[in-house]
Amino acid sequence: MMSYDYVLCKWRGHLWPAKVLSRSGTAPKSKRKRALSIEVQILSIDETIKAKSTDIKALTESAMEAITSPLTCSPSNASPLLSRHS
């Protein structure tokens, strides 16, 4: 299905950037289709988990922009902690 080295993985209700460690498929004679199991390492916390392929999204430039755009600060929405040190 996917051949990405880095993905966004749904874990604990949020999407996390993760490195793909291994993939496992279903048996070819299986009549019932199941989600592919993927072992990933959540990068920001160094946690290794198994995730279903349905909980994985490609880590694309547009996905990264969607994540980082709310994090960009303008003077009107700057954190009070940042304002004190300015």
Image (cartoon, rainbow, N blue to C red):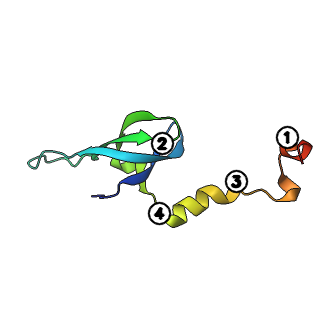
Q: How far separated are the C-alphas under marks 4 and 3? A: 18 Å
Q: Earlier in the sequence, mark 2 or mark 1?
A: 2
Q: In the rendered structure, are the residues bearing label 4 and label 3 in contact, judged by CB atoms less than 8 Å apart?
A: no
* Label 1 residue SS: helix
Q: Which residue is mark 2?
A: 43
Q: Is residue 33 above or below residue 50?
A: below
The part of the image, by quadrant, that contains residue 77 is bottom right
Residue displayed at 35% across by 47% down: 20
Horizontal arrangement in the rendering, residue 12 relative to residue 39 (left or right): right
Residue displayed at 77% across by 56% down: 73
Q: In the rendered structure, are the residues bearing label 2 and label 4 in contact, judged by CB atoms less than 8 Å apart?
A: no
Name, please, the residue furthest toward the bottom: 62
- The residue lying toward the viewer, choosing from 24 and 47, is 47
Which of label 3 and label 1 is nearer to you? 1
Q: In the rendered structure, are the residues bearing label 2 and label 1 in contact, judged by CB atoms less than 8 Å apart?
A: no
Residue displayed at 59% across by 63% down: 65
* Label 4 residue SS: loop
Q: Earlier in the sequence, mark 3 or mark 2?
A: 2
Q: Which residue is mark 4?
A: 60
Q: How far separated are the C-alphas under marks 3 and 1? A: 15 Å
Q: In the rendered structure, are the residues bearing label 1 and label 4 in contact, judged by CB atoms less than 8 Å apart?
A: no
Q: Disc 3 residue type?
A: Leu
